[in-house]
Image (spheres, rainbow, N blue to C red):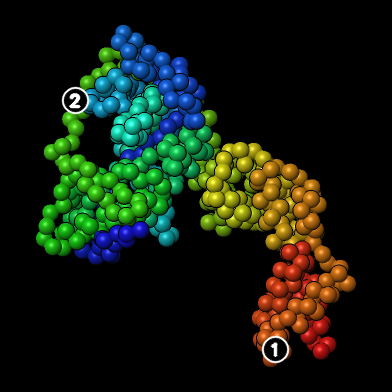
Amino acid sequence: MVEARHPAPPPTDFEVVIGLEIHCQLLTSSKMFCGCSADYAGAPPNTHVCPICLGMPGVLPVINRRAVEFTLMTGLALNCAIPEASKFDRKNYPYPDLMKGYQISQYDLPFTRDGWVDVEVDGQVRRVGMERVHLEEDTARLVHAPDSEGRPCSLLDVNRSGVPLMEIVSKPDLRSPAEARAYLQKLRAILRTLGVSTGNMEEGSFRCDANISLRPRGVEALGTRTEVKNMNSFRSVARALEYEIGRQTALLERGERVVQETRGWVEDRGVTVSQRSKEQAHDYRYFPEPDLPPLFVARARVEELRAALPELPDARSERYGREYGLTPYLAGQLATSRDLAELFEQTVRLYPDPTTVGNWIQTELFRLQKEGGDEAEARALLSAEHLAELLRLLEQGAVSGSAAKQVFEELYRTGRAPTEIVESLGLAQVSDVDALGGAVRDAIEANPRPVADYRAGKTAALGRLVGEVMKATRGRANPATVSELLRQELHAE
């Protein structure tokens, strides 16, 4: 992997200005303007299609009410104003994945606008303004692959065409890659809590384009911006922004100008590359969508949606600190999704030690989720009853800490009861002195160096011997019992 040539230096003379555009696929059962299923993942190509999403002449779109409500809910959660009237517009540009030759989107009258969200980095809170949250339709998917004779060709899968796509546009209020990442994490947590999107960047349901510029400190006017695309993870967004800060800083310090352009992030090289200059930018020629009338949302319906909003991550995090005594960090981690919060609260009702429950979810569950797999399926298998049972086994000394982690992983993978897992894998903790005596004496005999260190007053060396016994017993030995037996043996000699 080639390292980025422009790592971001501390921009002492320049202020970083970042704005983000987020596209989120909505969790509706049908597409934006037709009745085709929006759940196309894994489906054979071009099987979730109809004359409307294929762009056939003479067909008329029908607005998906649920998609509109999801957009309004998101706007309310982001403290946006909800205008009484809004409309759809045609966004015109020629591209093979655009079935009608235009995209139905929103231009000057979106569903929501002028909101804000607070993000925190290193103890500092920044309020990020929301320009707008609007609704549009997704495009088809181009698949580039060689044909049967090895010649390059492009295939079109229309299953994605017409899936509801919500765009969230921030104001240029972010000042660092770390703030951008925190903002994305906050948005995803809100969307998941609302249940309107999976927020999964890797699968393409949560996409981010970044606009970034530098300006001399103390200057109000914005500098020339570049737009960065092709980032498929929060880490990629942060790395791409760091690279762009370094690249633009180097240009400005040499007295050169930054070109307004669209650049693509190349993950394996760690660089951005030019894709399109300002002169090549599209003129979308927006005009009102003639096949859809203006949309008026009654105030009463807006207030019904506001009243039905679930507890949002910030409020939940604050409550967890107040009610359960959790640290701000742990409370914030548990508040990132409704599923996590429900698992935590249900488990605490069965095993009333909030910090222990929270730490197990935050460490073990997060670790397993990062390793891959279907999060929704795994969460369905991991019940509060089983997690509480496992923690009781650990508290009672029936399993060791290391064995409990193995049991947790099996819970996550299979949903089997903890006692059944312990029995089938032979993970019951051994506390019997006679059963452990041989392993303790073997560890002392095989490890003269830590034995000598311990007898010389280096008490930390005892941990090495405990580890050897744990290894010999495959994690089943009770560490406290092992420590006591080791002390007795070493002092007796």
Location of residue 360 with respect to 170 vertically, above or below: below
Residue in the picture at 76% in, 45% down: 417
Most extreme residue toward the top is 58
Extreme right residue here? 434
Q: Secondary structure at mark 2?
A: loop
Three-letter amino acid code of the residue under disc 1 = Ala
Q: Residues within 10 Å of mark 1 (few under 14, many from 20)?
A: some
**Closest to the observer: 365 or 158?**
158
> Hey, which quadrant is residue 136 in on the image?
top left
In which quadrant of the rendered image does the N terminus lie? bottom left
Mark 1 vs mark 2: give the one in front.
Answer: 1
Left or right, 314 with respect to 212, comes to right
Q: Nearer the viewer, residue 227 or 40?
A: 40
In the picture shown, does residue 430 fall above or below 292?
Answer: below
- The residue identified by callout 1 is 452
Marks 1 and 2, the one that precedes in the sequence: 2
The spot of residue 190 in percent (x, y) is 47, 40
Question: Which residue is denoted by mark 2 in the rendering?
Answer: 285
| Picture residue at 57% right of the left edge, 53% below the top | 367
Residue 285 appears in the rendering: yes
Q: Position of residue 397 (x, y in %)?
A: 79, 61
* Residue at 56% over, 43% down: 373
User: Image point 60% across, 44% down: which residue?
Assistant: 341
